[in-house]
Amino acid sequence: MGMNTTQPPPSTRTDAYDVIVIGGGAVGENVAWYARANGFTVALIERDLVGGECSYWACIPSKALLRPGEVLSAARRVPGAEPAVTGAVDVAATLHTRDVSSSHWDDAAQASWLDSIDVTLIRGQGRLAGERRVEVETDDGVRLLQARIAVALATGTSAATPPIEGLDTIRFWDSRDVTSSQTIPNHLMILGGGVVGAEMAQAYRRLGAEVTVVELFDRLLAVEEPAAGELLGQVYADEGITVITGAKAVAAKRDRDDGPVSLVLEDGRVLQADELLVSTGRSANSAGLGLESVGLEGNDYVAVDDQLRVKGVDGDWLYAVGDLNGRALLTHQGKYQARIAADVMGGKEVRAKADHIAVSRVAFTDPPVAAVGLTELQAREAGIAVEILNVPYSSVSASALLGRDIEGFAQLVIDGPRRTVVGATFVGPMAGALLHAATIAIVSKITLDELWHAVPAFPTLNELWLRLLEADRGI
Amino acid sequence: MAEVYDVVVIGGGPVGENVAWYARHNGLSVALAERQYLGGQCSFFAGMPSKAMLRPGDALAAARRVAGAAVAIAGNVDAAATLRTRDGFLGDFDDGPQAEWLESLGATLIRGEARLTGPRAVTVETPGGPVDLQADKAVVLATGTSAAIPDIEGLDRIAYWDNRDATTTSVIPERLLVLGGGMVGVELAQAFHRLGAREVTIVEAAAQLLRDEEPAAGAMLRDALESEGIAVLTDVTVARADRDGTTGPVTLTLADGQVLVGDELLVATGREPNVMDVGLDHVGLATTDFVAVDDALRVQGVEGDWLYAVGDVNGRTLVTHHGKYQARVCADVIAGKNMRASSDHGVVVRVAFTDPQVAAVGLTEQQARDARFEVKVVSVPWSSVAATALMGSDITGLAHLVIDNERRTILGATFVGPTASGLLHPATVAMVGGLTLEQLWHAVPASLTLSELWLRLLEADRGV
């Protein structure tokens, strides 16, 4: 702020709203939206950009970086289209599209949307200051807010930095840097082959970089079915992406900020690259949130019940939604919690039950990896009498129509005695489109025998559903 | 002396093949009679070849919509390569692999024209003479349909294409007239246009393309086709057809006097059942109409529960996948299982593989109103989800649900847009399960997939 302007005196007034939301990412915005739809007055506090991580530094820009490579490789697989594909991904155009998709990191459109639904946006750092009380540090000083009904915490997570010697002293990329970079390094090294690492490895490879992925577990996407990560690993090898699995990094070095970066592995190997992306996990943005003022620890995920109410706080007024509660670190699941939380505040009888049984997740790699519910291992550990159904993409005509060399599979994890779906994984072109039917099947507990009458259209990939049911019948 | 089988199947298209497959799986002995190609209409003349002709244009159009990919696309669809790919799917009209597959199942293939000669009795005219078959349990008719030729003056005297000709041609006509704007007509019109036909004109008698679908779907498809240069005439009646010789230009004269000229004419106005020569008269049935069946796929009006009709020939739903569904149900009924083709009534799935695709299941709004449901319609544009912008620029699309607002269940769904068919199966599952919108609220679609349209539809229902 200019020092010469006349500053208004710090407000001593306390503004009251029905609902106060701290954190204006996609999840906080949805709490605000649904709370408004339920008739509440709402204030939303954001310290950075309204729209949050997903809009500017994660889902949206990463998909914009991946899409050109995906459509070109799809066209190259089709003999009648392949001769027309004469070039490679246009880096400048792709980065420009990414900038547009990320609204050039300007949140004016989102702010005016909030305005249009009569949500009061307060820019600044919000923190709890006792029961139903919130303080906001704004550019104009501290404001005090009082919540009549509820305070919802939706501050999300940030990239976690693993305890690797030297890493805290050097410059490296996190998920924000890799999705917003204006340059493509010659050689990008990626520590962590989860969704972020796997997506960015392929995006940067197809944008022209040499890419090396260093992964602690024995495959990419280690939390998913082993076959998914294994198939992706093969594809990456074919594309010239180096994936080093079972590798533990013990030290990181960088002599100057713009110089090469080295990673030392436990087995003594030293890897060097021009840039390092660290994508090994997330940590909750719970510090500085004033959790101590309501008797909570302030350095971890904030535990909630199925109504998204924070455990250990009396009076049913404090909620935590989205990544911050650690239930499912996914935008769509956070938005689901936001809808549920706003309805709970509105006195409706709803619970976030999908968080337990039907969390869907998609890696927008090529081929995509789409999964929902339990993996086979998780189902067995949960004591379910598991049956596995697995069919290759090549079992349906739609796969051949997509082009040459299409690889993929569809897998269901079945609760044998109940004859219901408890998990599903699809890997292959357009796999994300196969997922929602599985999500519906899991949520509704519809049996395989009922699904027999859901006829998939010929020749679409949905016929994989028929092949899965035939596999169940032993045909 | 007649050869005896548990099940005799007449017609070896995908539907007949599926009857044979599932009947064998249920432990029944099976003979299958086919007069031409195993795999039938769908493998050789419809489903697969038309999709193979559409796919390259689809893939290039998808890439052109993406800024970072568009500059990498220099040319158009390679027609020769496309037709070679299609021929690959046709297997050069060699059904040997399918015959081997049938044999591997332990089904007996008998090549020839088959007809009913009495209860449970079938005679096949093979090259080596007539073969008499006796069915212990069931005879299954799966003879399908052929293109129906409309009653237009002059049409019976000229050469023209039906869907078989259009999907097997090695020539891309300069100017193609397409009579009929149903599924076959719209798919092939776009395929030929993208394969290089300079002028393609669709002539449709109804007020919209895809007349059985939602008006908004037909309108959206029309916009897309017209914007890429395909002419669409609706609400028109063709008065006469003429042709200069057998290969010269074709002329269609419309009732209003307008004259359309093309180098080839595709007639795609409908289908008629293949029932003329299958001996229905020997079991007391008419030989002109679709063969009416009950939900067990048993032919109505025939005593003894032995005669079944599956697929197009029964006229219930003229789509391959429902025919195959009927085949599965039928083979289970024959084996004594308690199974009925329940989905044929309210949950019929259809897809036009145009760009944009039109994918629908169940009832349209009008059909639901006619059936006196308490109808509520929710509709959202594709622009309402982030996945659309990420797919590329200038993508329009529609997601539309017809809701039984009394039961809070889905009666019908229509999706229009690139890859719209991917949105369909969730609707089918929800309808088969009788799931309420309130249950669907907990089925969370993954971020940045088009499935988030499902969330927008539920939000629209809530009035959010």
Image (cartoon, helix red, strand yellow):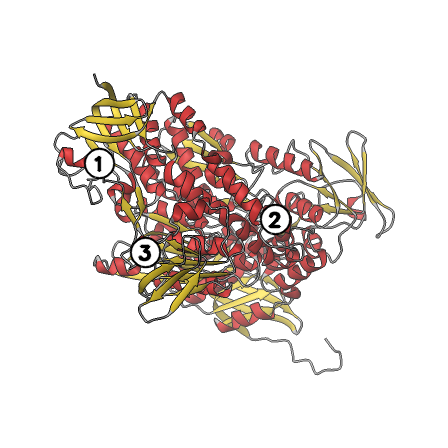
| Residue identifier under label 1 | B296
Q: Left or right of B446: which side holds B358?
A: left
Q: From the viewer's side, name the closer residue of A251 and A7.
A: A251
Chain under callout 3? B
Q: Quadrant of residue B107?
A: top left
Give the spatial CA distance, label 3 vs label 1.
Answer: 39 Å
Residue B302: give x, y in percent of width and height.
13, 34
- Please name the residue shown 49% across and 45% down the image: B52
Tell me which residue sits at (44%, 38%) in the image: A464
Q: What mark, if any, has residue A70 been given in the picture?
A: 2
Left/right of residue B208 with respect to residue B333 in the rendered view? right
Q: What residue lies at 31% left-to-right and 31% top-to-bottom?
A: B19
> Which sits in the foreground, B198 or A61?
B198
Q: Could you tell me residue A326's position as x and y percent? A: 55, 47
Chain of residue at mark 1: B
Please indicate whether residue B428 sits to the left or right of residue A144 in the image.
left
Q: Using the image, determine if residue B26 lies above or below residue B144.
A: above
Q: Position of residue A61 (x, y in %)?
A: 63, 56
> Foreground: A338 or B149?
B149
Q: Taking A403 as reference, is B123 above or below it?
A: above
Same subunit, labels 2 and 1: the answer reads no
- The number of discs equals 3
Q: Is residue A432 left or right of residue B441?
A: right
Q: Residue furthest right?
A: A255
Q: Amino acid at mark 2?
A: Glu
- Residue count near mark 3 (Cα–Cα under 10 Å), binned few <14, some 14–19, many ≥20: some
State the quadrant of the N terminus of chain A: bottom right
Dot 1, crowdedness within 10 Å: few (<14), some or many (≥20)?
many
Of the numbered discs in the image, which one, if any, rests on residue A320?
Answer: none
Q: CA distance from mark 2 to mark 1?
A: 45 Å
- Image disc number at residue B155: 3
